[in-house]
Amino acid sequence: MTTAAWSFTEDILPWLAFTIAMVMVLRLPVVPGGAVSRGAKWFFFASIACYMIGTTASIVGHGTTMPGSVTTIVDAIEVLWIPFILFGVYSMYARQQLNDALAAQQGVVQTGEMMESIVETTPAGILVLDPTGWITYANEAARRLLDLEEVPDLGSLRTPGWKVSCGDTAAGSEPREDFRDLVCTEPADSVPVVVEWPNGWRRRFSANSAPVLAADGVLTGAIVAFIESEPWRSAAH
């Protein structure tokens, strides 16, 4: 094989291939949310450039004698393609991990917003109770059915002073100012609840309760959903 043919096969063709590869890398679109980040793109470009420097030096070396120091520097630069391409791969991996985390976070946010919309629009009253039975959250239906008012300065809910009786004989159970009888370690269904206002008017509800447990199993409250089982009645009725 002649020197010209050898030079074309061993040097010119790789140089052309690297040039095409560099152009393709430069034209890679950096799409928001895509796997290819700007950093990965330039790491891949630098990796190809290191190889091109070695190929260019080889082509030049066929026409002239290069000093040993230059050859040493070129060889060192050519080896850099390894860390550059590794950095590029790592950058793509990190970008994909970030995209997956953002997608998961967005999914959680959308699910939370959907659940909040369902809770606020359902005709059933929904309460979140602390371990002592005090209300920490009430949806719109619960506020209407129980005459709850929000205290903006305290960030809490104020009751009109009613008393609550819960249990199979709700009307005869000891009235309380809270819903502590619904805070249990086991779920409860169709619990009769009587709420009596200071003026003697009362409402009867059917409530379902589910415990809220901490990671260590400690009871931290309950979630209660209830519907009105009877219309308004006075104490005389």
Image: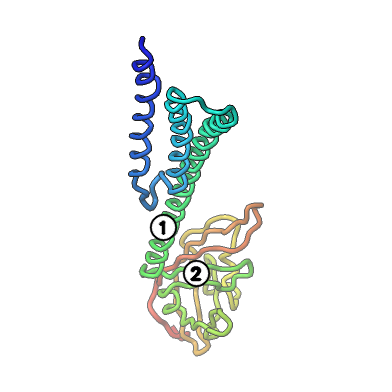
Label 1 residue SS: helix
Q: How many marks?
A: 2
Q: Are marks 2 and 1 in contact (CB under 8 Å)?
A: no
Depicted 86 relative to depicted 148: above or below:
above
Depicted 105 relative to depicted 151: above or below:
above
Q: Which residue is mark 1?
A: 111
User: Which of the labelled discs sits on residue 76, or is there none?
Assistant: none
Q: Residue at x 53, y 31 (%)?
A: 74
Counting other residues with Cα less than 10 Å from the Cα at mark 2, is it few (<14), some (14-19), or many (20 or more)? many
Q: Nearer the viewer, residue 210 or 139?
A: 139
Residue lying at the far bottom of the rendered structure = 199
- What residue type is disc 2 on? Leu
- x, y percentage for residue 37? 43, 47
Q: Where, quadrant-wise, is the C terminus in this rendering?
A: bottom left
Quadrant position of residue 110: bottom left
Q: Which residue is mark 2?
A: 127
- x, y percentage for residue 162? 53, 82
Label 2 residue SS: strand
Nearest to viewer (mark 2 / mark 1): 1
Quadrant position of residue 15: top left
